[in-house]
Amino acid sequence: MKNIVVLVSGGGTNLQALIDAQNSKVIKKGRISCVISSNPDAYALERAKKNNISTDVIRRKDFNTFDEYDRSLTELLKSKNADLVVLAGFMTILGKNVINEFRNRIINIHPALIPSFCGEGYYGLKVHEKALKKGVKLTGATAHFVNEVCDGGPIILQKAVEVKNGDTPEILQRRVMEEAEWKILPKAVSLFCEDKIIVTGNKTEITL
């Protein structure tokens, strides 16, 4: 049984999707052992506590340098015996220490079909604003491993979502979450825990 540590910063809707998936046995051979927040007031912490999941807080501003923060986060994750780290709305950049220590063991969910609308500056509603401005007919979400390039790690799963007439960024954001993010993130986590993801270079192969 692999230990899954989820990093959060806000409301924790993706965390809730993972908790629900765990409770309904969608996630196999893994369990959420800890939720770590960059924000002590994040509602995601309450979601964890309601489900008897241990919590911790680490704030970037409590460290003098980014390197100190990076090393401390790495050690915190190691102390939690993390087999897999999941970014569920975590709004702090990860440093090289964390990425190297947990190479191909950090999964992020991005609210677009990478390589579209991704990279530095593309987060939250901004992603959906850009998609609507471009006039795309399909958008979606991508579950991927994290590397040194923002949104540049190996892609695990993607799911397309229709863009509809009259969509606002908020409406589109909700549809992408409901139809894509909350479905493929738990599935990607389960695939990892079941050792069904093979990474070669910057590509993945899902084994059956």
Image (cartoon, rainbow, N blue to C red):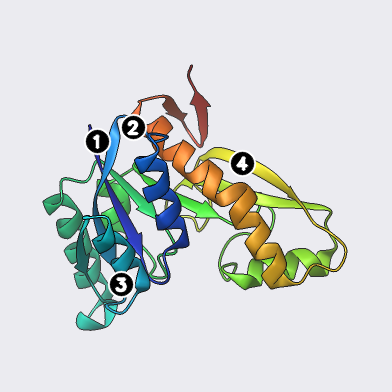
Ranked by sequence position, the earlier of labels 3 and 4 is 3
Residue 38 circle label: 3
| Badge 1 amino acid | Lys
Q: Residues within 10 Å of mark 3 (few under 14, many from 20)?
A: some
Left or right of 39, for residue 131: right
What residue would you read off at disc 2? 193
- Front position in the image: 165 or 71: 165
Helix, strand or loop status at disc 3: loop
Ranked by sequence position, the earlier of labels 3 and 1 is 1
Ranked by sequence position, the earlier of labels 4 and 1 is 1
Residue 73, image x, y percentages: 22, 63
| Badge 2 amino acid | Cys
Helix, strand or loop status at disc 4: strand
Q: CA distance from mark 3 to mark 1?
A: 23 Å
Q: Are marks 2 and 1 in contact (CB under 8 Å)?
A: yes
Left or right of 39, for residue 208: right
What residue would you read off at disc 4? 158
Q: Are marks 3 and 1 in contact (CB under 8 Å)?
A: no
